[in-house]
Amino acid sequence: MLNEFFEAQQIDFKTRRNLNQYQLTNECDLDIPFHAVECKRYKSGCIPKKEWWQQVCESALKRIPVLVYKFDYKPIRVCLPLYAVNPSIGAGSNELTAILAMREWILVLGNNWKMYEKMESDIS
């Protein structure tokens, strides 16, 4: 879905699993522009574990942390900082979060891509 998004937006990027994350600490599963993405899949549950969010926040460094998770028989969900959804919140705090469906996150990416580019240049 992410690669389809990049192609549709004419962004010259393809994501793939970060195999280094198995050997190094503080590495995310997917490294996409402006974001560090951690992916989790579990048999049972309905809300993400606090440790999952802490893990992706630690690996994000100056990028936007994103937790993609899936429990059996439930849709894919995405947890990200509220500022990544609503730029008026202001970047910086990862404590205020939003949980979206995967397709909703893809829409947020499309709507906010220019803002993410600006946030990146402001941080640098």
Image: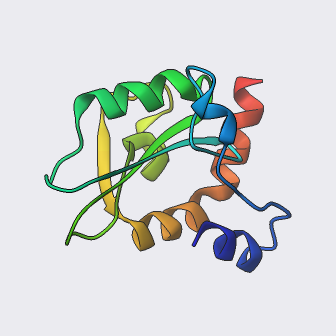
Q: Is residue 38 left or right of residue 13?
A: left
Left or right placement of residue 32 versus residue 111 in this view: right
Q: Residue furthest left?
A: 45
**Rendered view: 24 above or below 86:** above
Q: Quadrant of residue 62?
A: top right
What's the coloring here? rainbow
Q: Residue at x 57, y 73 (%)?
A: 1
Give the percent coordinates (x, y) of residue 116: 65, 46
Q: Quadrant of residue 11?
A: bottom right
**Residue drawn 50% across the image and 70% down it:** 107
Where in the figure is residue 6, as x and y percent of width and height?
A: 72, 69
> Residue 8 occupies which quadrant of the picture?
bottom right
Q: Is residue 76 above or below residue 116?
A: below
Number of numbered markers? 0
Q: Is residue 98 left or right of residue 18?
A: left
Up the image or down, 25 lies above or below 119; here it is above
31 or 86, which is in the foreground? 31
Spot the residue most to the right: 12
Q: Residue at x 65, y 57 (%)?
A: 113
**In the picture, which quadrant includes the C terminus?**
top right
Q: Nearer the viewer, residue 17 or 123?
A: 17
Task: Residue 75 in the image: state x and y as whole percent.
Answer: 28, 70
